[in-house]
Image (cartoon, rainbow, N blue to C red):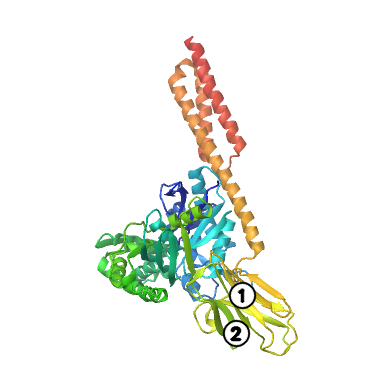
Amino acid sequence: MAKVIGIDLGTTNSCVSVMEGDEVIVIANREGARTTPSIVAFNASGERLVGQMAKRQAAKNPRMTIFAVKRLIGRTMDDPEVQRMRSFVPFEIVPMGSGESKTPGVKINDKVYSPQEISAMILSHLRETAEDYLGEKIDQAVITVPANFNDTQRQATRDAGRIAGLDVLRVLNEPTAASLGYGFGEDRHETIVVYDLGGGTFDISILRLGDGLYEVLASLGDPFLGGEDFDNTIADMMLDEFQDENGLDLRADMSAMFRIKEAAECAKQELSVARETDISLPFIAMKDGVPLHYERTLSRVELESLTQHLVERTIPMCEQALADAHLNKSDITQVVLVGGMTRMPLVRQRVSDFFGLPINSEVNPDEVVSMGASIQAGVLNGEVQEVMLMDVTPLSLGIETMGGVFMPLIARNSPIPCEASEIFSTTVDYQEMVNVHVLQGERRLASENHSLAHFELWGLPPLLRGMPQIEVKFQIDASGIVSVSAIEKTTGREANIKIEASGGLSEDDINAMIEEAEAQRNKDDEIHERIERINEAKGLVYMAERSLKQLGQYLDEEKSTQVREELKAIKEYLDNNPELMLLEDIVDTKKRLEEIAQSIAEIAYQAMT
């Protein structure tokens, strides 16, 4: 049976894992790391880099290095958070697509990439990592998303998986995945809190565990609260200090901004274990021909003072989650921390103080979400039998009614999969059509909630207002994907819609991106094969040189000189022209090297006998 992988597609880092028998294996990437930076870059020659290679060159190539794209996926350009993100990233975020609410895209040279395409590049990289480890083709996955992602964002994540060549069997909430990773293989009977503060989002979920059942009681969060905000807070402090001291604002200098942000992230990480850290950025700018530097010591106390407000933003959501679950703090038996930001001592202490419990340190906060995703993958393909998952929808779903009022049909934290229906009628005499406006959110006014879709039901009987009986039915599947139908009870006329990403990619867009991604994969495969063949050829050069050194005494001077010159020419060709070489050229080169080595051996053998 083909393997199904579990992927934690993170804002800052991503992780892939797989079930091997009864064990969850977190798969290391080609650099040997168990997590991969969620970064994509394009270098001057147009080559695409993903992960650690992209991160290494970021300071020198900030405008073509894309990070934190998860914060853009499934959003529209008029979203205040998208506008805020535009102000602190070095790459260009531009509107793309059609319609009133255009989606954000990332412009690299003359091409605009959707967040789904960039995410697909990261997913493809993780898929290839898994294929290298397993030695087989992978085409199915479970991908995690923040619990507070709305339907549009979930659909967009599915689209990213499709573009990457993956059949996404399930979109799984990150805290729920973490609970699977925490409880798998143990006979636990607990009520736990999963506090997930990652690179870009915050989630809080409360779950009841027992006899293999993982039941989500409540879940909510903030899609724009995470490590990026902590980094930006530190960076703002550094920028303000530099401007006060030197009268120079570095915010327009993208290269300097990237170095500052990178230094802020490093300082934050170091202060999770140290009391003080030194920030040193030599030659960060020039003023009147004089180089300027930024040097300062940052203490943990200063960091905590700077970022205290961000940590405090999570506490009201913890209180609300308890209320939604109809529980008190005393009902909680374990607090599980997930996400890199939970390594920060201030976060750990504040959460421990709030719940009145010590923090559970059994799980790796960077890997447990991916592990849970692979366990769910094992459940879906039949490898894991003893686990049952009951998740919830994090946001209410409903429609717009007369006067612009939002009427929920499915309440927040309802168990999924689920369905609900309600009878509505017309507001105008002899009305022939109704427009159903599907919304998601918690506000009473329709305009304040997230619009998922509009669809129309035609052919209503010509009756006075209030007489037609129109049943609107919502269905949510196990991935949290929404379907809505409307049926007029008298005539039986029906209209329905499976909600597609609002203002997102059309089916034609997705298919075009799938074809482009497949072409890129073929190109990558060809490059990878070429590199392997070149390395093999270089190995043959080394072996031929070694043979010449050991057996050269048996060759006459003319033959020895000829072989040395030919080997030198081949070596220079391999070193200086790898991107120009066709596979046939490399094969011919290898064949010639093998002939050289054989001729040396034959001449030496004849001379010795």
Above or below for 96 versus 266: below
Report whether residue 290 is seen: no
Q: Nearer the viewer, residue 383 or 152?
A: 383
Q: Secondary structure at mark 2?
A: strand
Left or right: 159, with 250 as reference point: right
Q: Which mark is residue 170?
A: none
Kind of residue sitting beneath label 2: Thr
Q: Decide: marks 2, 1 in contact (CB < 8 A)?
A: no
Left or right: 165, with 241 as reference point: right
The percent coordinates of residue 587 (x first, y second) are 59, 33
Q: Which mark is residue 401?
A: 2
Q: Nearer the viewer, residue 310 or 47?
A: 310
- Comparing labels 2 and 1, the label whose residue is closer to the camera: 1
What's the CA distance linking mark 2 and mark 1?
15 Å
Write the residue at 59% across / 71% down.
502
Write the residue at 74% across / 83% down.
461
Write the residue at 40% across / 62% down.
209
Q: Which mark is residue 473?
A: 1
The percent coordinates of residue 5 (x first, y second) are 50, 52
Q: Residues within 10 Å of mark 1 (few under 14, many from 20)?
A: some
Q: Secondary structure at mark 1?
A: strand
Q: Residues within 10 Å of mark 2 (few under 14, many from 20)?
A: some
Report whether residue 89 is seen: yes
Quarter of the image for residue 192 reads: bottom left
The percent coordinates of residue 593 (x first, y second) are 54, 27
Write the residue at 67% across / 86% down.
426
In the rendered image, the residue lying farthest to the front is 211
Disc with the residue nearer the chain's start (2 vs 1): 2
Q: Nearer the viewer, residue 79 or 412?
A: 412
Kind of residue sitting beneath label 1: Lys
